[in-house]
Amino acid sequence: MPTTFRWLLRIFTALVVVMLLVLVFLWTVLSRSIPDYSATWRVQGISGPMEIVRNNANVPHIFGPTDEDVFFGLGFAHAQDRLWQMTLMRRTAQGRLSEIFGARTARIDELLRRLDLYTLATQSVAAQDPETLAALEAYARGVNAWLSQVNEGALGRGAPEFFLFDPQIAVWQPADSIAIMKLMGLQLSAHLESEVLRARVSMLLRQDRLRDLLPDDPGQGVAAVPDFASLFPGVVPSQAPLRIAEDRLSPFPRLPFAGASNAWAAAPGRAAAGGSLLANDPHLGLSAPTIWYLARLELQSGGIIGGTIPGMPVLLAGRSEGFGWALTSSYLDDQDVFIEKLNPDAAEEYLTPEGWKRFETRRSIVTIKDAEPLTLTLRWTENGPVLPGAHYDLASVTPPGHVTSLGWTVLDPADRSMTAALRLMRAQTVAEGITAGGDFTAPSQNVTLADRDGIAMVTIGKMPRRDPRHQTQGRMPSPGWLAENRWQGMLPYESNPRFVAPTSGILGNTNNKTTERPFPEHVSFEWGDTQRIQRWLRLMRMRDVHTRESFIEAQLDTVSPVARTLLPLIGAELWFTGEPAPTGTPDHRRQRALAMLAEWNGEMNEHLPEPLIAMTWLRVLQDKLIRDELGPLADDFSHIQPVFLERVYQNTDGAAKWCDIIQSSPVETCADIARIALDEALLRLTERYGSTIESWRWGDAHQAIHDHATLGEVPVLKYLVNIRQSTSGGDFTLLRGRTSGKDPDPFQNVHGAGYRGVYDFADPDSSVFITSTGQSGHPFSRFYDNLGELWRRGEYIPMSLDTGLAKAAAVGITRLNPR
């Protein structure tokens, strides 16, 4: 027995030693790709010595003899910290994910090839002005200079992910940066899904009930829009949910996640310190690392500082010494789905207003790891590329003998959006900023501007010119062979909405409706917010003058206008006034929950149980109201629709009819459904979080999910690379944390403000900003998640252009000398 024990001990000791040696080896190899921020490098492609000073938060301050050298430095810094992220986004835009991920991403690649974003980006290079082309080329030289250093110095392949995937990295080119901007356009577009969803729902519901669930915007005269079945009688209604591939690597957004953001500004007369104020928090999918990267560029026109996206030589949101710019999704309707009629006698022809015409076709081969390559025939019509029927379930709205094509402003081969973005960040005044937006094509944004003297907001991006006779007004797929349904060029930039020097001295956007103009200059029928704007207006009106702190307070506000508005309405007949029910019964649990909600102020605080009760109640209630009419298609309404619930419980235009469950013999009232939904919600929560209601926490359900796109599903590794944080806020708070909407964790926070900035032009260096994770994309770096806890707590770091301050606490100064 002692002998056996000794051998077991020896074996265990040997295994421990081997494991430690393996870990040491892995650490030694993988850590070589953590850049040395205090190194001096000799590089090709710069005109003179330059410095990249990284302050104590690892924000690079880049100084060089010329603007081209500074853009070179930005490319160098991006590649040092985010090389895997950049190459992954490039592969995505190129439709080449399957070369390293196999069949898992074949469908994603197919869709990207059919959209042909990378070819269009290559064509767009020639459309840029000389200054932009010089910046793109310099940035590419900077990226490639770091690739050379990695290869020459054996620096861990540049990123640890390259030890698991193909380590071959193609040189960076100007087209790659434009392709990433087009990829961002894809991630911010959802009108395609909206058109398909509206078409399918219109075949299941009467027009008055359709207006309840997908409410028309007032004053637009959309009552004349026909139902989809009357346009295409051959389409069979279906209750199946939309088939959309959901993958961490997919850039195709679902409707609830197609872009959001907040931005607001105060003119000097409404600011306590006498200088303009500007706040911005763009909302995108949360990830590790975040898509945002903070940087300062010292250009010949002056210093600028703010948020970049690795892969592009542009500050998308930020400020200079006296000018700031902020972005929010405009929801401009820049996509239309067209149903194209095929020639029954010639499969390669489709119908146009002038007769039959051949598709433009070419072949494309998708290489798939460990599988046979996929050969595609790409087809284009005059309206745009032909898409497969499986994409957003387009087959469900396509009659036999037809195919669907997509009209989309991003598909412009002469896209000058990069030129516009670089001009915007070089602007010095509001007027110059507005002018800079004239060349912008897509993705359309509302740009809020502030300088020392005033504020403005303008919608940038091309607006399709539609015929007033358009059969569906762009709200549903339309016959592509009819001239009145086709785009007739683009509206002039001067027709885009703009608000300059408002008399109130305050302006802002939460993706809310910005204009009442009638079709076809309406901008959009679909808007991203009807609720946050109400809370923002209240906060802005509470003060005669604002400060940096009051703007921060608004940015971090967690009060839900939906909870404050809907709960009293839905629970009007449920609030307990009689004898208490016996302890442990469903009635007692309901009475306790209602008592807590009655005393709650609507604050979506992570430490409170009331937000969890309220949101679960509303989620269950909405599902009960719509599922008997829509069947499985109700799954596509994965998030609470406040306007719908308000219409039902106010019985607007007879909307209370939704409360009666068709399959049941009794006629349920809205109070009955509210009670049943609350009991079911409380039962679900009890099963998951225990029977003590007071111990439930919203933050346990509303965890921010920052997952690594490729390593986040690898056993063991996922615990090192994924970041989880308990968070406040919700779908309808200014501190927006968009929930997943998917069971079993429908309240996970998956989409929010990865970047926050507040700029004060009375004292510009007192401005602040933050991102949701950290600057580095290397999981072993101390800068991988160092900003995450500050972001979670609603804290910021200084946003200063003071060179001395940056150097005083620098974590390293990288010196680049010409080779």
Image (cartoon, rainbow, N blue to C red):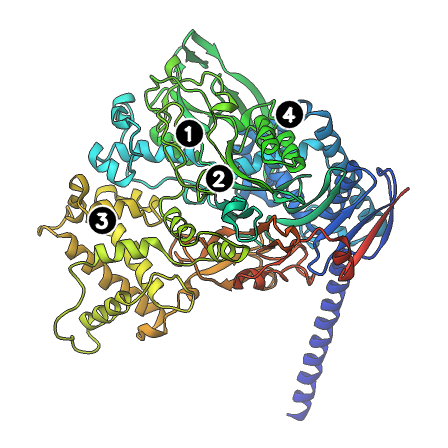
Measure the alpha-carbon separation of dots 4 and 3: 48 Å
Provide the residue designation for mark 1.
523
Amino acid type, callout 3 = Leu
- Secondary structure, mark 2, is strand
Count residues near mark 1 (Cα–Cα under 10 Å), then give few for <14, some for 14-19, many for 20+. many
Three-letter amino acid code of the residue under disc 1: Val
Q: In 3D space, how far apart are the residues under numbered discs 3 and 2 (Cα atoms)?
A: 30 Å
CB-based contact (under 8 Å), mark 3 and mark 2 = no
Image quadrant occupied by the N terminus: bottom right
- The answer to whether 315 appears left or right of 479 in the picture is right
- Amino acid type for the residue under numbered disc 2: Ser
Q: Which of marks 3 and 2 is nearer the N terminus?
A: 2
Instruction: Kindly identify which residue carries mark 3.
Output: 625
Query: Which residue in the rendered view is the most extreme toward the right?
Result: 819
Sequence order check, earlier mark of 3 and 1: 1
For mark 4, give the secondary structure: helix
Q: Residue type at mark 4: give it.
A: Ser
- Earlier sequence position, callout 4 versus callout 1: 4
Depth check, mark 2 against mark 4: the one in front is: 2
Mark 4 or mark 3: name the one nearer the start of the chain: 4
Q: Position of residue 67 (x, y in %)?
A: 77, 37
- For mark 4, does the 10 Å Cα neighbourhood hold few (<14), some (14 to 19), or many (20 or more) residues? many
Which residue appears farthest toward the top when viewing the image?
Answer: 354
- In the rendered image, residue 58, in percent from the top left (x then y), is placed at 71, 57
Q: Seen from this angle, which residue lies furthest left?
A: 666
**Mark 4 — residue?**
124
- Residue depicted at 52% across the width and 24% down the height: 493
Vertical placement of residue 355 versus 774, above or below: above
